[in-house]
Amino acid sequence: MIILKIGGSILTEKDSAKAEVDFENLNRVAEEIKEALFSEDSNSSLGNELIFVHGAGSFGHPPAKKHRIGEPFEEDKLAEKRLGFAEIQNEVKKLNSIICDVFVQHDIPAVAIPPSSFITTNNKRVDEFNLDLIKSYINEGFVPVLYGDVVLDKKLRMAVISGDQVIQHIAKFIKSDRIVLGTDVDGVYTKNPKLHDDAIHIDKVSSLEDIEFLESTTNVDVTGGMVGKVKELLELADLGVESEIIDASEVGAIAKALKGLEVHGTKISK
Ligand code: ADP
């Protein structure tokens, strides 16, 4: 079993104000998954059990920021918030539909499992998240596809759940051989490598102390960027579950990581 999450920074034009898919990257991601796990000549010893999770990128983050989903609000704003929630839910569903379409074109049996239809949170952390259906789809040979979405929240009424939190919860309860997160940088640095030439690569993160000096990340991201990602993965590391962050824009990196080959990145483990 492999859990693969590919960020919105790869699958969408994330900095763009408009919701746009990066089809070049999306097609390549599908090809690499197919090559590593689903082609007849694939020599992967793992078979083809895969759960795929994607970020919301430019489909989700700009409207979530605009409508301030996840922030407390006055009762007279409820109708407006509901509409915002509905708009975001619809946008990320469109992205998901395009991704599943491309996967199916590559002979990957992808089935969409929208988080907003069965996950709830309590103050932005998972409350209800039943994994039974995901397990059943896997047993039937499908590839469940989940994503960053909006969900009902017990405390805040509505919240955003990141793809990173989604994989964290899944990986806690479904034993996997590998957890791979592909983003647009090759792991965690001492500073944002996109902004600082003197950023130093960190090969392994084991505890929150290792990242406490990190500045907060990209400002379009309402779910925490790199720091949020590492925090989710550290919760897994605490349970003895190892994961890795790799550069999914590097051609071949995803296929290699899926096959268990060494890829330059950051390991999150104890
Ligand atoms: P994704 O959409 O792929 O989930 P994010 O955009 O949320 O990814 O996070 C990845 C981004 O985090 C990188 O593009 C990088 O610019 C930014 N970032 C900020 N701080 C760091 C850091 N210390 N190390 C690595 N990346 C960082």
Image (cartoon, grey):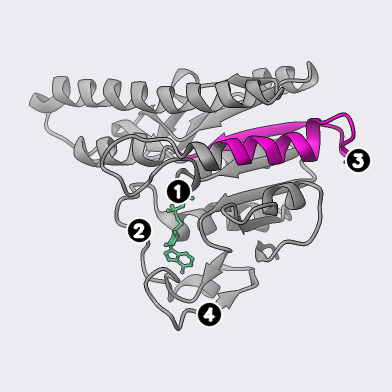
- 1 or 4: mark nearer the eye: 1
Residue found at the far front of this picture:
24
Which region shows up in magenta? 27-55
Residue 73's tag is none
Q: Is residue 141 above or below residue 202?
A: above
Q: Is mark 1 within 8 Å of ligand 1?
A: yes
Asked if residue 35 lies in the magenta stretch, the reply is: yes
Q: Label 1 is placed on what type of residue?
A: Ser
Tag 1 secondary structure: helix
Q: Which residue is mark 1?
A: 9
Disc nearer the start of the sequence (2/3): 3
Amino acid identity at mark 4: Ile
Residue 176 in view = yes
Identify the image quadrant of the C terminus: bottom right
Q: Is mark 2 within 8 Å of ligand 1?
A: yes
* Kind of residue sitting beneath label 3: Asn
Q: Residue at x 45, y 72 (%)?
A: 212
Label 2 crowd bin: few (<14), some (14–19), many (20+), radius 10 Å = some
What is the CA distance from the residue labelled 1 to the residue labelled 2? 10 Å
Residue that mark 4 sits on: 200
Quarter of the picture containing the N terminus is: top right
Residue that label 3 marks: 43
Please check the rendered image and state whether residue 231 is part of the magenta-colored stretch, yes or no.
Answer: no
> On the rendering, which quadrant does ligand 1 occupy?
bottom left
Compute the Cα span from label 1 to label 3. Answer: 30 Å
